[in-house]
């Protein structure tokens, strides 16, 4: 618990620094601080998760929307394959307590409700060890516009570069910053719009609400195109 508190404290320092400091100055410290506070990530063998029945839980519930191997069945649902276990766990707890309450979240409230803390940990590991979605190349103009914001931010609007927190290959930085690479387009558009409108409010220190509120609908589409292509 104490460790968790101090992690939270360090993340909030990173967040305030990112928001208050000039964009050029924040990238390295934000990435560095996020990295040093991370616990080593272990990749449990699939066989161990099978022994405790995790694939069965996935097959009977999650698979209908997230696929057996964490590949979403529609663009509005998130891929989970390769996502950091700490982030998946946080989201499942946030769904369970209804702290994540955006318009599509109630679908997940029902899914998360019966899961114990232990099962949440194991399901998170199951999806983490699945092979992440490969980038998909398309809409080169949109992708290029998104890439520019991803690495350069929007200095005139005070938007920091996304890579400072989500990493240079959009693979995320555990424990707090999710993987975005390969994520489904409609899902990303939805989440950025929810953050922008204050409908998703489970981001630590309002980090994403601050950022998304400064993106136009067009820029949100560009960000979704870019991360899908990574
Ligand atoms: C009926 C469809 C459906 C089923 C079944 C389902 N999910 Fe979801 N899941 C969703 C939708 C839709 C979202 C996006 C919700 C939103 O936009 O807030 C989501 C989001 C999530 C997220 C958040 C991902 C992120 O990137 O923030 C996690 C984690 C998750 N689901 C895990 C699971 C697990 C584990 C199961 C099985 C126990 C499961 N889901 C079953 C539809 C489903
Ligand atoms: C200051 C750090 C920071 C920066 C900079 C940042 N993000 Fe985030 N982002 C976060 C955190 C933290 C979360 C996870 C929120 C949570 O815990 O629910 C997140 C979540 C997201 C999500 C939701 C992912 C999911 O699976 O549901 C998207 C999409 C996203 N960010 C896109 C962006 C884009 C695009 C940019 C640049 C314009 C950006 N982020 C810049 C910290 C940041």
Image (tube, rainbow, N blue to C red):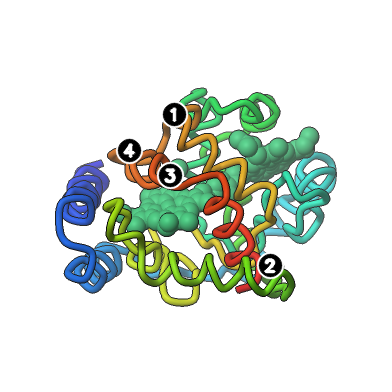
The 10 Å Cα crowd at callout 4, few under 14, some 14 to 19, many 20 or more, is some
Whether residues under marks 3 and 4 lie with C-beta atoms below 8 angstroms apart, the answer is no
Q: Position of residue 119 (x, y in %)?
A: 60, 43
Cβ at disc 3 under 8 Å from ligand 2: yes
Q: In terms of sequence position, does the residue under pointer 2 or pointer 3 come before the other? A: 2
The 10 Å Cα crowd at callout 3, few under 14, some 14 to 19, many 20 or more, is many
The 10 Å Cα crowd at callout 2, few under 14, some 14 to 19, many 20 or more, is some
Q: Position of residue 61 (x, y in %)?
A: 80, 39
Res 188 seen here: yes
2 or 1: mark nearer the eye: 1
Tell me if 9 is positioned left or right of 107 in this view. Answer: left
Q: Secondary structure at mark 1?
A: loop
Q: Which residue is mark 4?
A: 206
Tell me if 217 is positioned left or right of 185 in this view. Answer: left
Q: Position of residue 77 (x, y in %)?
A: 72, 45
Please tell me which residue is depicted at 83% across the width and 48% down the height of the picture.
59
Q: Secondary structure at mark 4?
A: helix
Whether residues under marks 4 and 2 lie with C-beta atoms below 8 angstroms apart, the answer is no
Q: Which residue is mark 3?
A: 212
3 or 4: mark nearer the eye: 3
Q: CA distance from mark 3 to mark 1?
A: 9 Å
Q: In terms of sequence position, does the residue under pointer 2 or pointer 1 come before the other? A: 2
Q: Which residue is mark 2?
A: 130
């Amino acid at each position: 618990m104490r460790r968790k508190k101090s992690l939270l404290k360090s993340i909030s320092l990173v967040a305030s620094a990112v928001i208050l400091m000039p964009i050029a100055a924040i990238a390295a410290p934000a990435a560095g601080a996020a990295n040093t506070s991370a616990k080593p990530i272990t990749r449990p063998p699939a066989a161990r998760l099978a022994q405790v029945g995790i694939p069965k839980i996935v097959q009977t519930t999650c698979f209908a929307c997230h696929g057996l191997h964490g590949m979403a069945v529609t663009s509005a649902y998130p891929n989970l394959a390769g996502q950091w276990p700490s982030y998946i766990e946080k989201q499942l707890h946030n769904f369970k307590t209804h702290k994540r309450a955006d318009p599509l979240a109630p679908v997940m409230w029902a899914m998360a409700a019966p899961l114990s803390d232990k099962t949440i940990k194991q399901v998170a590991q199951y999806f983490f060890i699945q092979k992440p979605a490969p980038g998909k190349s398309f809409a080169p103009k949109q992708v290029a516009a998104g890439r520019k914001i991803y690495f350069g931010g929007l200095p005139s609007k005070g938007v920091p570069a996304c890579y400072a927190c989500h990493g240079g290959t959009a693979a995320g930085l555990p424990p707090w910053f999710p993987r975005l690479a390969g994520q489904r387009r409609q899902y990303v558009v939805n989440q950025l719009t929810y953050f922008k409108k204050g409908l998703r409010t489970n981001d630590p220190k309002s980090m994403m609400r601050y950022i998304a509120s400064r993106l136009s609908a067009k820029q949100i589409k560009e960000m979704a195109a870019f991360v899908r292509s990574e």
